Amino acid sequence: MEENNLRSTGWFGRDGKDGFIYRSWMKKQGLPSHLFDGRPVIGICNTWSELTPCNSHFRELAQSVKNGIYEAGGFPVEFPVMSLGESLMKPTAMLYRNLASMDVEESIRANPLDGVVLLCGCDKTTASLVMGACSVNIPTIVVSGGPMLTGKFRGTDISTSDLWRLSEEQRAGEINQQDMLEAEAGMCRSNGHCAVMGTASTMACMVESLGLSLPGNAAIPAMDSRRKILAHMSGSRIVAMVKENLKLSDILTRQAFENAIVTNTAVGGSTNFVIHLLAIAGRIGVNLSLHEFNGIGNNVPLLANLQPSGKYFMEDLYYAGGLPAIMKELLPFLHKDVITANGQTVNENYAAAPCYNAAVIATIDNPVNPIAGVIVIKGNLCIDGAVIKPSAASPHLLQHTGKAVVFENIEDYKERIDKDDLAVDENSILVLKNVGPKGYPGMPEVGNMGLPIKLLKMGITDMVRISDGRMSGTGFGTVVLHVSPEAALGSTLAIVQNGDEITLDVFNKSLHLHVADEEIAARKALLKPFKMASDRGYVSLYQNTVEQAHLGADLSFLKGSSGSIVTKDSH
Ligand code: FES
């Protein structure tokens, strides 16, 4: 047995009854004695699940990671954690992000792990795993599952962003259910997560730009053999990271977060990036506020010509040079000297990255769109902020005044949106209440609510929409999201009435309800107290402790870290 400072020595390095128990039960899996000789024990935190189709190839991916760990002299142990499938989970996978993060945190801390590889794919599986790992803070590397191949439908390329378009076309009577069935078979035709710059791809870019993965991790398609090679190399690298004691907190500095914000702006990442990054910052102890996002991403244009803000797909991004080509172009805006998971700096990783297709990855001087990123807006309708993604919005609506058409909750919206007598025109502003963290609960992706059918039939494709909910990263439109505080807390959003005038001014970062302060106060006084959805179980815990969107919607008691020390010893 080698002398070392590894956590796993506290289990496998012991004599007597305790060591016997720790090793003997592991040996029933066919593990030879030399694996317990003091080599780094690496956990592979696996979110494989057939209920998370985006992560359904993760058993194979885990094997590649294991091969790399063995090759580097480590001892791999794979373990499952709660997996959050965006497409199936009700009421919303976001409700369970914080629960899954607790699973990850406690699973890592409770076990004899010296380092961990996080297998992340579908949206919340990345956020929850990184959050949980941050609260333990041992050497950690992320391997993303990779995007699906580009979907095919009747000779055209499609992916998740087209779902919103197809849905509106079906509602307008332009296509039928048979067309939809054909599209659904062609859209998701391979392993991997959504093939546009939706939230999963945004999260993959986030972990790479934070320095938590090997360079190139963000865009390699799930079906490309080079995804397995990256997994193998990541397995080897985590063993070295343990020996170097390169912990998450060494990588996740304030500068790393700023690099991630800059990168998210350039790739046209999802609005969900904001909420997840704030939660991760809260876990690792980096001070980051919502309103700083405007300053950090300033002057960075859209470089990635990817849906939903552009034209192409994640597969195209990989063939064009992947995130490294974008990071190279961004170097003047990045903290170049911060350390990343491979032990090298951002500059060392990306300074020589080639771009093979300027149509997919543009330059700073000739960007896809000079307006990019997620803009944080403020005003009497969102005292603590709200967000909008201008690159996915209609330019003519970025400064707009209109009369509110109010839906008190999602059920009210579904009931009335297509009614002939709904008083609405293309200048109206759709306002949806009570879809925030506490109000729904879980803050679902309903913020890009579909337009009234009668306007769709007139050819209207976008309107200003405002809510305290979220939007799928694959969605688009002039959509104000994450209004904070949410309506359920009796905020100003809760008292908006039909016909109230609202002004959205993205250029001046403001959202204003044209109702006098006295009238706002009088209406608030008449509000009924919000009723909790449940008085038991996790939902009750969530509703009682979840923070508002502008703070990352983490549970208040999960902020920060409990570290990796186990204080009680059961044997
Ligand atoms: Fe899993 Fe889109 S549903 S990434």
Image: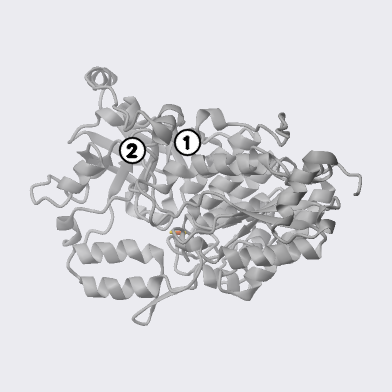
Front-most of residues 238 and 360: 238
Q: Is residue 435 left or right of residue 327?
A: left
Residue at point 62% right, 43% down? 107
Task: Measure how far apart labels 2 and 1 are at the Cα level.
Answer: 13 Å
Is residue 411 rendered to the left or right of residue 111? left
Looking at the picture, tell me which residue is in the foreground, 238 or 400: 238
> Label 2 belongs to which residue?
440
Amino acid identity at mark 1: Ala
Give neighbour class at mark 2: few <14, some 14-19, many 20+ (Cα, 10 Å).
Answer: many
Question: Residue 418 location, x and y as percent?
Answer: 15, 52
Secondary structure beneath dot 2 equals loop
- Location of ligand 1 given as a quarter of the image: bottom left
**Of label 2 and label 1, which has the lower sequence position?**
2
Q: Residue 468 vs residue 125: left or right?
A: left
Would you name the residue on which mark 1 appears? 553
Please rate how many residues cluster around mark 1, counting C-alpha atoms within 10 Å: few if below 14, some from 14 to 19, many from 20.
many
Question: Is residue 268 among the parts visible in the rendering?
Answer: no
* Apparent side of residue 118 relative to residue 544 in the rendered image (left or right): right
Residue at 53% x, 55% y is: 202
Q: Residue 489, percent across and down?
A: 35, 26
